[in-house]
Image (tube, grey):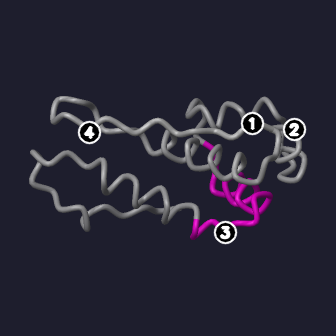
Amino acid sequence: MADLVPFPRAPRRPSDPEPLWRQLLGDQLRRRRHDRDETLTETAEKAGVSPQYLSEVERGLKEPSSEMIAAIAGALDSSLVELTSAVADELRTAAPVSTGVSASAFALAA
């Protein structure tokens, strides 16, 4: 499988909408799957979901339940806590500066 080279993210402008949690979750899952050189089918089989469903989760089109997220995380040898913490860290860096909300004010409930 070819190496993936991530493109640097452009800085967010205050007028840009905040990214959705499901989009950042999908990005995180895809990165972890690619780091393991696994196909959608391989990871989906381990997680007990269809490749189509996993693809939709990775593209940020589905709002998976915490049980589904835990199953996919487990298939990637990760935990729900590790995965959600990584997504929360990305949300903190994407928080708009102009709102006056501190990055530590974000919390996730699973």
Label 1 Cα crowd, 10 Å radius (few <14 / some 14-19 / many 20+): few
3D distance between C-alphas at marks 2 and 3: 20 Å
In x, y percent, where is residue 21? 45, 45
What label sits on residue 2 in the rendered view? 1
Residues rendered magenta in the picture: 64-82
Q: Residues within 10 Å of mark 4 (few under 14, many from 20)?
A: few
Q: Could you say which is closer to the camera, residue 44 or residue 110?
A: 44
Q: What kind of element bears circle 2? A: helix
Answer with mark 1 or mark 4, whichever residue precedes in sequence. 1
Where does the image place residue 56, in percent across and percent down from the top left? 67, 31
Distance in Å between CA atoms under marks 4 and 2:
34 Å
Mark 1 vs 2, N-terminal side: 1
| Secondary structure under the numbered disc 4 in the rendered image | loop
Identify whether 3 is placed above or below 68: above
Query: In which quadrant of the rendered image does the N terminus lie?
Result: top right
Q: Residue at x 30, y 38 (%)?
A: 18
Q: Which mark is residue 95?
A: none
Say which label, 4 or 2, has the lower sequence index.
4
Q: Quadrant of residue 100?
A: bottom left
Q: Amino acid at mark 1?
A: Ala
Question: Which numbered marker is on residue 79?
Answer: 3
- Residue 89 occupies quadrant: bottom left
Chief secondary structure of the magenta span?
A: helix
Mark 3 to mark 1 CA distance (whole Å): 27 Å
- C-beta proximity under 8 Å, tags 1 and 2: no
Residue 41 circle label? 2
